Each structure stands twice: as structure tokens, then as C-alpha cells.
Amino acid sequence: MIAVLIIKRYIASNIIDFNISFLDPSSYSIVMKNMPKNTTKDDIINFFHPILKEKTKKEKEPVVIEKINFVYSVDEYFDAFNTKV
């Protein structure tokens, strides 16, 4: 019975490690809809700043916004695609 408890804890730890290793950017993506067309990246950063500041206090590493992409502004992605083709 004791062996089962020890093995169960070991397996649970391995499952958590396995799940963490398969995180990708979509696991941390946020989609915001119906924003005004004149919204800027600074507006979004200022909106999330208090939340990120609070999360940074709890985490080992700072929580930051890596990339902001406006769906109606995809020119840089088209340019990058066209240069690769």
C-alpha cells in the first residue's frame, strides 16, 4: 500500500512536468474583441500593467507582454511571408 502511494506521487509529478513541457504561445494568448480602431499598443500595455505587476510579484520570473498583434494590421506578417517565398 505504501508503494502505491509513493508511485502515485511520482507519476503525478511526471504528468505535471510532461504537461508543462508542452506549453506553447497559444496557452498564454489573449484575444480581445470589439476594440476601437484607434486603440494603440500603449493602451493595451497600460490596461494590463496592474495585472502583470501583480502576477510578477507571485512568479519567479517577470510576466511581460511579448507581442501585440492587431488583426486588422497584418502587413508585417504579409511582408515576412512574401520575403520567405
Image (tube, rainbow, N blue to C red):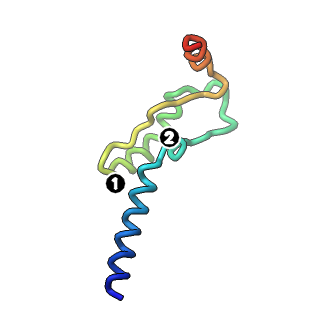
Quadrant location of the C terminus? top right
Q: Residues within 10 Å of mark 1 (few under 14, many from 20)?
A: few
**Residue farthest along the right direction in this orientation:** 34
The numbered disc on residue 58 is 1
Residue at image coords 39%, 75% = 8
Would you call the spot at circle 2 few (<14 residues within 10 Å), some (14-19), or many (20 or more)?
few
Judged from the image, the secondary structure of the residue bearing numbered disc 2 is helix
Picture residue at 52% right of the left edge, 30% below the top: 68
- In the rendered image, residue 23, in percent from the top left (x then y), is placed at 47, 47
Q: How many marks?
A: 2
The residue wearing badge 2 is 25
Residue at 36%, 73% (x, y): give it: 9
Residue sitting at 35 percent across and 47 percent down? 56
Q: Who comes first in sequence, dot 1 or dot 2?
A: 2
Q: State which quadrant residue 10 falls in.
A: bottom left
Element assignment for label 1 = helix
* Residue 35 position in % (x across, y down): 66, 34
Q: Is residue 49 above or below residue 54?
A: above
Residue kind at label 2, given as amino acid type: Pro
Quadrant of the snapshot with the N terminus: bottom left
Q: Is residue 39 left or right of residue 24?
A: right
In the visual, does 57 lie left or right of 39?
Answer: left
Res 45 label: none
Residue 25 in the image: x percent, y percent? Answer: 50, 40
Outermost residue toward the bottom?
1
Q: Comparing marks 1 and 2, which lies closer to the viewer?
A: 2
Q: CA distance from mark 1 to mark 2?
A: 20 Å
Q: Amino acid at mark 1?
A: Lys
Residue at the extreme left: 60
Residue 24, horizontal then vertical, whole percent = 49, 43
